[in-house]
Image: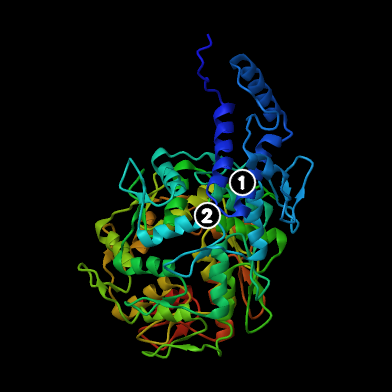
């Protein structure tokens, strides 16, 4: 029924709104400059002059409806008007050097950018000209778009209009609120088509895709470095400037990044603000929590396109890809050495021992890197003490881990078996047994391991570095556990005793192994034969199947499957005889020979 009123339908309100805007532009000659008026009219015409099927269908529908409702419909845009300014605008020449394409879009003459609207092209061209017409009246900030200036102004006003209905979070930007809401919903709508990685953030997906494409758009203007993310480039630039404005008031640690200092301070306070909602795990860094969550989901979103290697850690994939590309981005400033991993470069630097510019002002220690000196200085200041045994440390988190030796708490649980650990690193090592993954490789001899710390210790067989020094004699060790074992020789303390035969030892692990001589237990099984062992020397046995000899002498090339064999062999070069008889002057390179000698005294 015709009522005389114009019914609402999707096309008509839009046409009326655009026309009203075009007319209003001319009724405000003081507030609206001529150029912006032209741009608005061009945009208005562009909407109605597109040559696509969808628009044509909508316009044809509108024409049919107008006939039924007796609405006059002007052929150009759907609005009949006698207003003189309308015709005036359509006849004006285009003052900007733009080219109109076949589909009536606007194309940039400087690059391949195309726009539907001339106003969009004008904003884009400011990237080429550097023009930033919108100025902040409270600071030096300026922007290419008014919307950017409006967002910036919220930093001065503190205004946060967008509030979360679930918690107290508030923000000045709608996009930030939408991203925050995914934390409550758990929604991850953006998925990688290559490996199935999902994220709540479109930008995060864009960054992730670069792990597949290899695109690194952020270039350093002082060297060949390039990065997939701008923060990575910002961090890299501090290597050129050397500036480290952020300093820790507790230990003197300095860094170029405020976020690094914030994370570092948590080593003193013990604060771990990032909590897992599925177990009791907490972390000082958000990225550590993100990595932890993969243990619950089993997800390994990062995959190598060359060999199918998958991992839950992006940095592991980056390092792995270098085994295919041969890339070695870490360069030594003192020689031509280069490495695929930063840790390898750090270890190499120690070879330039005569060039250690960073000196400790409390002892004779010197280091090739400032970060190593900072870690060393913390050893002089150990404010955190255990009330049970007097153990002291410079790090609150280390004290927390130590306390578990008294309480027996093992908070890190394996999802695949009953194993639990006092330290996260111990659980990481254990998980590698299930996956078989060995991402850490020695660049000198090809030795591979699932544990970064094992690789660090292994590298000392090549470098000869023994960082752990005895305070009571000249003994030094490549491993802290070896130093701990050595120290009991000075104290003579043996607190662990066997209830079966009275055997005493200074080490709990030694007592555990000894007890198996009574029980007959051999928990370490070989997967390839019937061999089993009471001690954790199964890896040495496996070498009989693989022929692998990971322990190599840097002096003569001697290789062996057993570290103990290498240690004995090294004494042939050094002449050292560490095993001494406490009843006479006899000394020997082999502990077994000392035991035989001791029998001559008892007999």
Q: Is residue 266 left or right of residue 133?
A: left
List the single residue furthest toward the top: 1
Indicate the quadrant where residue 264 lies: bottom left
Q: Secondary structure at mark 1?
A: helix
**Toward which corner of the image does residue 540 lie, by quadrant?**
bottom right
From the image, state whether disc 1 or disc 2 is nearer to you: 2
Q: Position of residue 225 (x, y in %)?
A: 65, 69
- Residue 40: mark: 1
Per the rendering, the mark at residue 30 is 2
**Sequence-first tag of 1 and 2:** 2
Q: Nearer the viewer, residue 330 or 493?
A: 330
Q: Is residue 497 above or below residue 183?
A: below
**For residue 232, above or below residue 286:** below
Residue 31 in view, yes or no: yes
- Judge whether residue 116 can be spotted in this image: no
The residue that appears at 43% across and 87% down in the rendered structure is 365
Place of residue 452 in the rendered image (x, y in percent of width and height, measured from the top left): 52, 63
Q: In the visual, does 278 lie left or right of 387?
A: right
Q: Residue at x 52, y 54 (%)?
A: 30
CA distance separating discs 1 and 2: 16 Å
Give the residue at the far left of this rendering.
387
Which one is in front, 435 or 174?
174
The residue most toward the right is 102
């Amino acid at each position: 029924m015709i009522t005389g009123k114009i019914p609402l339908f999707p096309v008509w309100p839009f046409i009326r709104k655009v026309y009203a805007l075009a007319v209003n532009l001319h009724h405000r000659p003081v507030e609206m400059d001529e150029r912006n008026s032209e741009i608005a009219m061009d945009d208005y015409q562009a909407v109605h002059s597109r040559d696509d099927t969808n628009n044509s269908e909508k316009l044809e529908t509108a024409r049919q409806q107008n006939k039924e409702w007796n609405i006059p419909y002007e052929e150009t845009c759907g609005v009949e008007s006698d207003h003189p300014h309308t015709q005036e605008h359509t006849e004006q020449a285009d003052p900007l050097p733009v080219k109109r394409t076949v589909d009536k879009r606007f194309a940039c003459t400087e690059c391949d950018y195309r726009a539907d609207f001339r106003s969009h092209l004008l904003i884009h061209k400011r990237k080429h000209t550097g023009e930033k017409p919108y100025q902040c009246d409270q600071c030096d900030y300026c922007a290419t778009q008014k919307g950017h200036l409006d967002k910036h102004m919220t930093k001065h006003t503190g205004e946060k209009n967008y509030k979360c209905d679930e918690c107290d979070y508030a923000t000045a930007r709608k996009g930030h609120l939408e991203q925050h809401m995914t934390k409550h919903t758990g929604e991850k709508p953006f998925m990688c088509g290559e490996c199935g990685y999902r994220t709540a953030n479109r930008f995060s997906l864009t960054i992730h895709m670069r792990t597949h494409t290899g695109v690194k758009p952020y270039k350093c203007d002082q060297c060949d470095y390039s990065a997939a993310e701008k923060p990575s480039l910002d961090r890299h630039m501090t290597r050129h400037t050397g500036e480290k404005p952020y300093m820790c008031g507790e230990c003197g640690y300095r860094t170029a990044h405020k976020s690094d200092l914030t994370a570092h301070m948590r080593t003193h306070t013990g604060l771990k603000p990032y909590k897992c909602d599925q177990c009791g795990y907490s972390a000082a860094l958000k990225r550590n929590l993100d990595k932890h969550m993969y243990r619950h989901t089993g997800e390994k979103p990062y995959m190598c396109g060359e060999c199918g290697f998958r991992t839950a850690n992006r940095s592991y994939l980056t390092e792995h890809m270098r085994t295919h590309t041969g890339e070695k981005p870490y360069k030594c400033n003192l020689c031509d050495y280069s490495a695929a991993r930063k840790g390898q470069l750090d270890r190499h630097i120690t070879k330039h021992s005569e060039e250690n510019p960073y000196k400790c002002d409390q002892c004779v220690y010197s280091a090739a890197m400032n970060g190593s000196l900072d870690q060393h200085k913390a050893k002089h200041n150990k404010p955190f003490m255990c009330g049970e045994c007097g153990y002291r440390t410079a790090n609150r988190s280390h004290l927390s881990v130590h306390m578990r030796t008294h309480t027996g708490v093992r908070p890190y649980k394996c999802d695949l078996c009953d194993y639990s650990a006092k330290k996260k690193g111990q659980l990481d090592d254990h998980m590698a047994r299930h996956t078989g993954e060995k991402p850490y490789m020695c660049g000198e001899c090809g030795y591979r391991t699932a544990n970064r710390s094992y690789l660090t210790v292994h590298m000392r067989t090549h470098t000869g570095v023994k960082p752990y020094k005895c305070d009571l004699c000249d003994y030094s060790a490549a491993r802290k556990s070896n130093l701990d074992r050595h120290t009991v020789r000075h104290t003579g303390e043996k607190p662990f005793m066997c209830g079966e035969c009275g055997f005493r030892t200074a080490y709990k692990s030694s007592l555990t192994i000894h007890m198996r001589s009574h029980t007959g237990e051999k928990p370490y099984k070989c997967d390839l034969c019937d061999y089993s062992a009471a001690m954790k020397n199964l890896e040495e046995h496996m070498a009989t199947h693989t022929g692998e000899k990971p322990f190599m002498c840097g002096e003569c090339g001697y290789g062996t499957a057993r570290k103990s064999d290498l240690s004995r062999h090294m004494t042939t070069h050094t002449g050292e005889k560490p095993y001494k008889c406490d009843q006479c002057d006899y000394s020997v390179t082999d502990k077994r020979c000392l035991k035989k000698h001791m029998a001559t005294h008892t007999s």
